[in-house]
Image: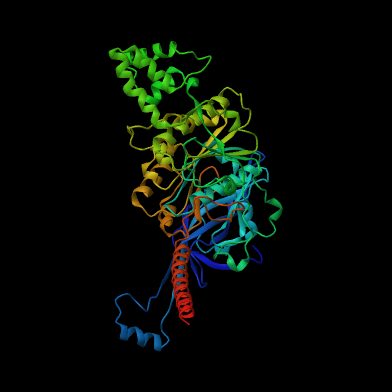
Amino acid sequence: MSGIPKIGIIVGEVNTSEFYFSTNKDINRLEYVAIHSKELINIAGIMRETDVSIIAQIFEVFADSRALVADLKMEDAEKIISAGLADARCFAKARVLGYLHNGNIFQPRRAIKPGNPVYLASNDLLAEFYSYPEEEGLYIGHLITRSDVPVYISIKGFQRHISILAQTGGGKSYLGGVLVEELYKKGATIVIIDPHADYVLLGNQLEEESEENLEEGEQNDEGRQDEIETINRMGVFQTPNSTGIYTDADVGREIEQYSIRFADLDAFEIFNICGIPERFTRIRTAIESALANLDSATGYNLDDLINELTNADTNDSRNALRYVRRMHRLQIFADTTTPVCDIIRPKHVSVIDLSGIPDYVADYIASRILNEIYDQRRSDEYHFPVFVFIEEAHRFLPNKPGRRGGGYSIDIVKEIAAEGRKFGVFQALITQRPYKVDQDALSQCNSQMILKITNAEDQTAIKRSSEKLSEDLLSDLPGLNIGEAVVVGNLTRAPVMVKVRRRNTQEGGADLDLLGMLNEAREYVDNEEQRREEDLRQDLEDTRGMLE
């Protein structure tokens, strides 16, 4: 490791997963170090002792003094210091991440010996450690402690589904947008279930900011401008009764309508929407009989079914009416059904804007779209993989079942979580309340991208759902800054702590500029008072002129 700074010596008891080292340098927690060691490696079928560079990350830094002990009086401490007898020792604890060999990371099987030197890991070594081939890698940011070491994750990690977890304001939707940008460049078909209109502005490129306007730790990503690609193949869909919070002008394209032709529903879909149990066979039969009397060729609507049940005037039809009338609440039925081929297209982003509509309506729309996507891939009618981002996953995948007036999506989301990878449907579950999400579905996400989390219940849920999140990494979550994330699982060769890069596209659904709006209100009132004074002064002058 010629030319690389030596920063310490390994001391004390050592094992294959962690070690202590003594140092006389000012070192930072979370910094990366490298140790020279030898491992038995299978090379061409023969086990050979081979030199390797083991990467480790510092997760605790200590300092103590044998002279300045804990129970020493202040006066005695001052005497020791003034006599020049005070000593100081610095040492650190590091966790082993592994060593790189032939593009794969392996865990050492030999303990590193005390007395071995510890070096600061070079940028080149770290970049190689966390890099992937160009066709596979998704650029998401840089190491928290090394702004000049880019971090790429593997697109192959999506094959086992992912979750993005953070408390409110932690940057989960921002990170989701970064992933969409990267997947789009690879040609992905992307569908986003978006309850808060966080993604509807993805088609608008972010204006370049000057260095002085960037927050601490942000970069303009100079030298990567050739990789910036505008998301111009995009559609935003709203329901006929969606209020929406952005106009066509804001979005930069005409917002498309998502609707369902009532006559396209079969009896079983109506049973599911209305929540009619299988044991209510007579009610189901009444609905099937009413549907048989309607002309599917010319089409019919919900009111036609209600009228047919009303005219039947039997106990079963009257009981059926109590269920069927609930469908009016969904307010998504129109003269035509939006075909799924409008939503899933090669190298295309479709945002299903569900802002401003009730949860149970959003839940049903999400369930229908997900079922259609899954059917298209399972039957191979659509030939390309589909990446589905589900924001506010706790609303569609409740940990406590039995919600009244909802629960439409949970079955299809869990089925995709369990079987979707076989058919090329990959999910990203995004939530700020992990403990409210169905734990079976969350545990099916083999990779986690976790931003700042302080809630104890959420931390416990994350620990249960992730086999690869150590206690050390779990304890780091409350200390993350906004926009910093821990990535574990199949997305990365080894757990990595990353500062998420700046997006190239605009973010929707952001918090209001509260201070700016208050300043605007204050200026409005000040100007209004000034106008009144000017009007009063003008009136006095006019009156004086008339008297003269």
Residue 77 location, x and y as percent? Answer: 34, 83
- Report whether residue 104 is seen: no
Q: Is residue 377 left or right of residue 76?
A: right
Rendered residue at 61%/47% (across/down): 252
| Image coordinates for residue 138, horizontal then vertical, percent | 61, 47
Looking at the picture, does residue 187 appear above or below residue 29?
above
**Where is residue 47 drawn, in percent x and y?**
61, 43
Q: What color scheme is it?
A: rainbow
75 vs 184, nearest the viewer: 184
284 with respect to 249 (left or right): left
In the rendered structure, the answer to whether residue 259 lies left or right of residue 122 reads left
Q: Nearer the viewer, residue 468 or 360?
A: 360
- Does 466 appear above or below 9? above
* Nearer the observer, 370 or 154: 370
> Looking at the figure, which quarter contains the N terminus?
bottom right
- Which of the 4 image quarters holds residue 88? bottom left
**Is residue 287 depicted above or below 482 in this figure?**
above
Q: Residue at 45% across / 13% down in the picture?
A: 294
Q: Is residue 272 visible?
A: yes
The front one of 253 and 77 is 253
Residue most extreme to the right: 226
- Whether 488 is drawn above or below 117: the answer is above
